[in-house]
Image: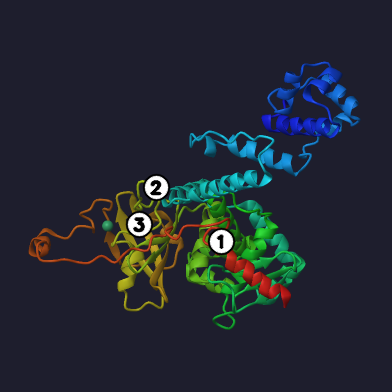
Amino acid sequence: MSPTPLELSTLGHRIRHQRVSHGYTLDELGELVGIAGSQLSLIENGKREPKLSVLQAVAAATGVEVTDLLSPEPPNRRAALEIELERAQSSSVFRQLGIAPVKVTKGMSDDTIESVLGLHRELQRREREAIATPEEARRANTELRLKMRAANNYLGDIEKLAEKQLSAAGHVSGALTHRTVSIMAEQLGFTLIYASDLPGSTRSITDLENGRIYLPPASIPGGHGLRSMALQAMAHRLLGHVRPTDYADFLQQRLEINYYAACCLMPETAAVNFLTQAKKDRNLAVEDFRDAFGVTHEAAGMRMTNLLTEHLGMPLHFLRVDGSGAISRVYENDDLPLPQDVTGAVDGQIACRKFSARAAFSEQNRTTEHYQYTDTPAGTYWCSTQTGSTADGEFSITVGVPFDDARWFRGRETHKRATSTCPDEACCRRAPADITDRWADKAWPSARVHMQMFSPLPRGTFPGVDENEVYEFLDRHAQG
Ligand SMILES: [Zn+2]
């Protein structure tokens, strides 16, 4: 392996440092080691790789070991500044600008170099942040979804890790208790602390120095959201996550911590046993799975996408759709025709009005699941949808399968049936001709600005998080 230019540059600085501290000129040391002063200058500037015999001669002439000269450390602060500047000026970000690099001279002060370096550091920081434009964020999201689709949405290593942690904490079966989650945290060296002043941009904060995980207080006593949040915070540690390098990395980590939490709340062995029995009984239902493990309908539906294909050989789809019809969470490996934008992103797109996911909003009785068959250009699907509402409005959770697999599910005998021809606009996007004629020139609707999924784009290392608030929070609590 040949040294990179940067290593040559450090080597040059170390040689110059020895030469200058012994009071030699270039020509004087050159004569001692048997090369011209101009050659030595090229070596000191990192432009030429010295022969081993020259290195040995320099070491002997200056009374150090060859290994000293080869150390990767800059010999002093000035050299460190110069090396960092050389590195910054040779980066592609800088060279793209077409600006001539600063030539460092002996007379240039450290402060001047510091100031130029400050500009370079800021340039690099902005370059890193700009990576996540909305379009690139959507592409990263799509890539991850397709990667997970190819893997049946199943991550075996995380499944095993979760089962190991659960059994170490003494969990046997049924719903995971808050108490067990606390024990799991303790075994990792963390105490769970509920704080009412968590910064608005965070869900939890982990204090690595003092071994604390700060969580918001439960809005509903006994509510189950906190178990998931605590497990996700622990997952970052267990999975060895380091600061995300880009948006794709951030998404991958978020997927993994969600996955880990889901594995703890609905452990693979118990969950697969439950689902296998329900299939045998031809009584599969998201609501039963949800209730058996004490989780939300959404969490139960998503968990089925991890297990049904891998363990029961069943392709399926999952949709979370809001009241306006926009898809906010999605998984499919059953070829359900879903709307996509030019980047291939499904999130944020409007689902077909005929889909169960939207038809369920018009149900009067919403205490049970809405069942529906839908004929599409890709075949017939059976879906079960549960609606709910939050402060942000209504939403629906749908789990569905191709027609042939409907026979394993409760609700297969439904008579509700719809036909969707989307993406054909005549399906549900365009009004019938007579109404269009009636209103086309007499209506002027004002659009509500649509909340774009990825619009509040990440600033800083932790996307979407106000680091200043986080550090202030930690400071405040670490003293207490
Ligand atoms: Zn449609």
Q: Secondary structure at mark 1?
A: helix
Q: Is residue 283 above or below residue 42?
A: below
The numbered mark, 3 or 1, whose residue comes first in the sequence reads 1
* Outermost residue toward the front in this view: 107
Near-viewer residue (365 or 151): 151
The disc at residue 344 is: 2
Q: Residue at x 54, y 46 (%)?
A: 123
Coordinates of residue 399 in the picture (x, y in percent): 43, 62
Look at discs 2 and 1 and give the one toward the viewer. 2
Q: Is residue 243 above or below residue 394?
A: above
Q: Amino acid at mark 2?
A: Gly
Q: Where on the image, by quarter, is ligand 1?
A: bottom left
| Mark 3 → mark 2, Cα distance in angstroms | 10 Å
Provide the residue designation for mark 1.
276
> Within 8 Å: ligand 1 and the Cβ of disc 1?
no
Provide the residue designation for mark 3.
349
